[in-house]
């Protein structure tokens, strides 16, 4: 797939940044229930309007589940967009959510393994993917008293990066920029802190076969 021109990426980044700041201004003043409903609606709107990403989502589901009918793939992709909209709303609300509010939305299994890892005193690497509400999980772990940092890729727009970083820090966890994370990660591990890594993004270096196509 051809790379987008840099000028186009910058314009899209700026537009996305303005939209994100507008959304934050709205979501921050809404009650949780209304915010989730609005997020779900925006996710469904994105599914309807974003032809490119809708096609990517459906194609990926068909690769992962070749026995599915086209209708199953489309219905699941639609739910993915809806759930992502809800997750976005919860991310905006996370800094002001109580522990009880978060616990009603999460199912926590195996926390004793995290406690055991911390007792070794060597720090913890939390490795997951971009599924579920990873932002809400980080907020919850901070509220439980765990020292958490995450490695994050900068957005194409500086203002977007600053807003997302601010929301994450208000939720109680530190943010390490992906390009300069190695030294910060080692320092955090030596201090017996946890570092969250979500490696399911294209790093542009090593490529392997994944569901029948190259992924890096």
Image: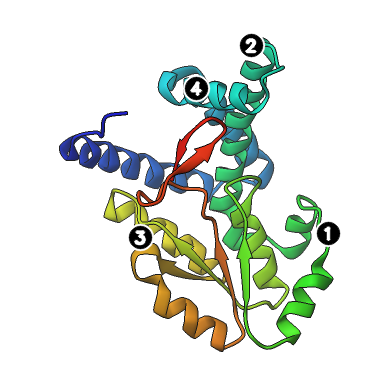
Q: Is 199 located above or below residue 62 in the figure?
A: below
Residue 87 or 124: which is nearer the viewer? 124
Q: Nearer the viewer, mark 4 or mark 2?
A: 2
- Mark 3 or mark 4, which has the lower sequence index? 4
Residue that numbered label 2 is attached to: 70
Residue that numbered label 4 is attached to: 54
Measured as percent of width and height from the top left, residue 133 is found at 64, 49
Q: Secondary structure at mark 3?
A: helix
Residue 130 or 106: which is nearer the viewer? 130
Q: Secondary structure at mark 1?
A: loop
Disc 1 residue crowd, few under 14, some 14–19, many 20+, Cα 10 Å? few
Q: Dividing the picture into quarters, in which one does residue 136 lie? A: bottom right
User: Which dot marks residue 162?
Assistant: 3
Q: What is the C-alpha distance between the residues marked 3 and 4? A: 28 Å
Question: How many marks are shown on the rendered structure?
Answer: 4
- At 64% from the left edge and 28% from the top edge, which residue is drawn? 64
């Amino acid at each position: 797939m051809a790379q987008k021109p840099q000028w186009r990426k910058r314009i899209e980044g700026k537009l996305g940044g303005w939209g994100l700041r507008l959304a934050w201004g709205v979501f921050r003043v809404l009650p949780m229930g209304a915010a989730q409903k609005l997020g779900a609606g925006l996710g469904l709107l994105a599914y309807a309007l974003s032809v490119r990403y809708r096609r990517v989502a459906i194609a990926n589901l068909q690769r992962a589940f070749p026995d599915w009918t086209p209708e199953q793939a489309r219905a699941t992709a639609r739910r993915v967009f809806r759930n992502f909209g809800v997750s976005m709303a919860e991310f905006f609300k996370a800094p002001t959510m109580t522990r009880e509010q978060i616990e009603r939305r999460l199912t926590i299994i195996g926390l004793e393994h995290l406690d055991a890892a911390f007792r070794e005193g060597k720090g913890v690497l939390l490795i997951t993917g971009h599924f579920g509400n990873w932002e809400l999980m980080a907020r919850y772990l901070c509220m439980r008293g765990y020292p958490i940092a995450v490695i994050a890729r900068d957005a194409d727009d500086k203002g977007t990066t600053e807003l997302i970083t601010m929301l994450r820090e208000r939720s109680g966890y530190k943010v390490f920029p992906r390009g300069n994370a190695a030294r910060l990660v080692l320092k955090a591990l030596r201090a017996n802190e946890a570092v969250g890594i979500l490696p399911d993004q294209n790093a542009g270096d090593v490529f392997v076969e994944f569901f029948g196509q190259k992924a890096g």
